[in-house]
């Protein structure tokens, strides 16, 4: 199962905003994978979109940078949604 969101477009918008990020096709193992799979399964029944985002701890990437990244991600999602991209 995969997200219905336009991941490549979101990625490009984040990179253009200066966010250091990567695309992955794995949510990881155990808890992360379980949560993502169950979310995708529920979304398939409701028409909602799901996105799983791994974030590092604040020792690796400071909180301020992570907050900026999440703000940019939400802006990118809102922009694409307003243009009917999903």
Image (tube, rainbow, N blue to C red):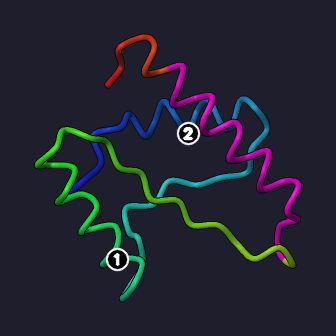
Q: Quadrant of residue 46?
A: top left
Instruction: Looking at the picture, tell me which residue is in the foreground, 48 or 17.
Output: 48
Secondary structure found at label 2: helix
The crowd level at tag 2 (other Cα within 10 Å; few <14, some 14-19, many 20+) is: some
Q: Residue furthest front?
A: 46
Within 10 angstroms of label 1, few (less than 14), some, or many (20 or more) residues?
Answer: some
- Measuring from the top left, give residue 6's x and y in whole percent: 38, 34
Is the C terminus in the top left, top right, bottom left or bottom right quadrant? top left
x, y percent for residue 60: 83, 75
Residue that extends furthest to the top in the rendered view of this protein: 83
Along the polypeptide, which appears first: circle 2 or circle 1?
A: 2
**Residue at 45% in and 60% down:** 24
Left or right, residue 2 beside residue 52: left
Q: How many marks?
A: 2
x then y, percent, for residue 49: 31, 42
**Residue 12 rendering spot, x and y as whole percentages:** 58, 32
Q: Is residue 39 above or below residue 48?
A: below
Q: Which mark is residue 33?
A: 1
Q: Which residues are magenta?
A: 60-79
The answer to whether 67 appears left or right of 75 in the picture is right
Quadrant location of residue 72? top right
Disc 2 designates what residue? 11
Whether label 2 touches label 1, CB < 8 Å: no
> Overall secondary structure of the magenta stretch?
helix
Task: Identify which residue is drawn at 75% across, 31% down.
Answer: 17
At horizontal 71% and vertical 39% (from top left) the residue drawn is 71
How far separated are the C-alphas under marks 2 and 1? 21 Å
User: Is 62 part of what is drawn in magenta?
Assistant: yes
Name the image quarter holding the N terminus. Answer: bottom left
Secondary structure at numbered mark 1: helix
């Amino acid at each position: 199962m995969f997200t219905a969101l336009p991941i490549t477009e979101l990625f490009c918008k984040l990179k253009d905003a200066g966010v250091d990020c990567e695309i992955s096709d794995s949510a990881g193992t155990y808890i992360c994978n379980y949560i993502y799979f169950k979310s995708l399964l529920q979304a398939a029944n409701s028409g909602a979109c799901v996105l799983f985002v791994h974030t590092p701890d604040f020792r690796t990437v400071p909180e301020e940078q992570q907050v900026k990244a999440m703000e940019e991600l939400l802006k990118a999602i809102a922009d694409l949604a307003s243009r009917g991209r999903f």
